Image (cartoon, rainbow, N blue to C red):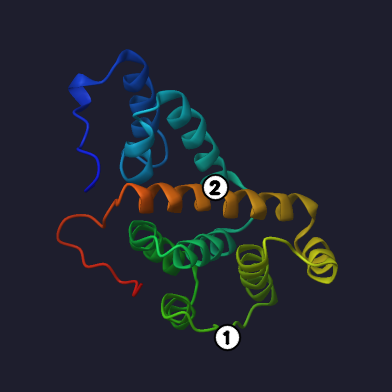
Amino acid sequence: MSRLSSLDPDLLSPQQRKVYDDIESGPRGEVGGPLAVWLRSPNLADRAQRLGEFVRFNSSLSPILSELAILVTARYWSAQYEWFMHEPFALKAGLKPEVVAAIREKRVPIFDSPEEQLVYDFAINLHDKHSIDEGLYRYAVETLGETSVVDLVGILGYYVLVSMTLNVFEVNVPDGAVPSLKI
């Protein structure tokens, strides 16, 4: 992190230590990226990491749709760290490499799956227009269901918070890694 120094886990306050331990023992297994920033405000860190755990690991969306939404958001905000961390997850979830490359290069991807196309269109529209028109909304609810549309908005919103945090505090990709997004 270029704007903030790393926190020494041995010097954390009791409240910070509890949040740190909760994150480390959860599905992420480590405290890095935005979580390390948020730890400076342990109440924020606790609430944000719990929301992040839900939208990342427990939402009603399949991993491929969730990771697609995350990549679109990371690209929209040019959040290098987020892209670096989630590109492998998206590929592992089954997102095609050519789709990932198109998003990385700010080209419109070609999808085989109508659900992937829908999530992409929904995310782009929400980021660009800050709203969803009635036709796209109805199609999303018919295709994904109300719960999944709510979860999709939650994923997009959470990863905007993540991206803003990463960009403001200039959280870079891990040492030795090369950023892959062209700004």
> Which of the 4 quarters of the picture holds residue 62?
bottom right
Among numbered discs 1 and 2, the one appearing first in the sequence: 1
- Mark 2: give few (<14), some (14-19) or many (20+) Cα within 10 Å: many
Res. 158 mark:
2
Q: Residue drawn 60% across and 82% down?
A: 111
Q: Comparing marks 1 and 2, which lies closer to the viewer?
A: 2
Relative placement, left or right, of 105 versus 149 is left
Q: In x, y percent, where is residue 157?
A: 59, 50
Res. 110 mark:
1
> Which of the 4 quarters of the picture holds residue 51?
top right
Task: Give the Cα separation between the discs numbered 1 and 2.
Answer: 26 Å
Q: Residue drawn 44% across and 53% down?
A: 163
Relative placement, left or right, of 77 versus 144 is left
Task: Specify the farthest residue to the left.
Answer: 176
Q: In x, y percent, where is residue 41?
A: 40, 27
- Mark 1: give few (<14), some (14-19) or many (20+) Cα within 10 Å: few
Amino acid type for the residue under numbered disc 1? Ile
Amino acid type for the residue under numbered disc 2? Tyr
Res. 46 mark:
none
Residue nearer the viewer, 22 or 157: 157
* Quarter of the rendering occupied by the C terminus: bottom left
Per the image, label 1 sits on a secondary structure element best described as loop
Q: Residue drawn 30% across and 71% down?
A: 180
Relative placement, left or right, of 152 versus 141 is left
> Which of the 4 quarters of the picture holds residue 149?
bottom right
Q: In x, y percent, where is residue 90?
A: 45, 65
Per the image, label 2 sits on a secondary structure element best described as helix
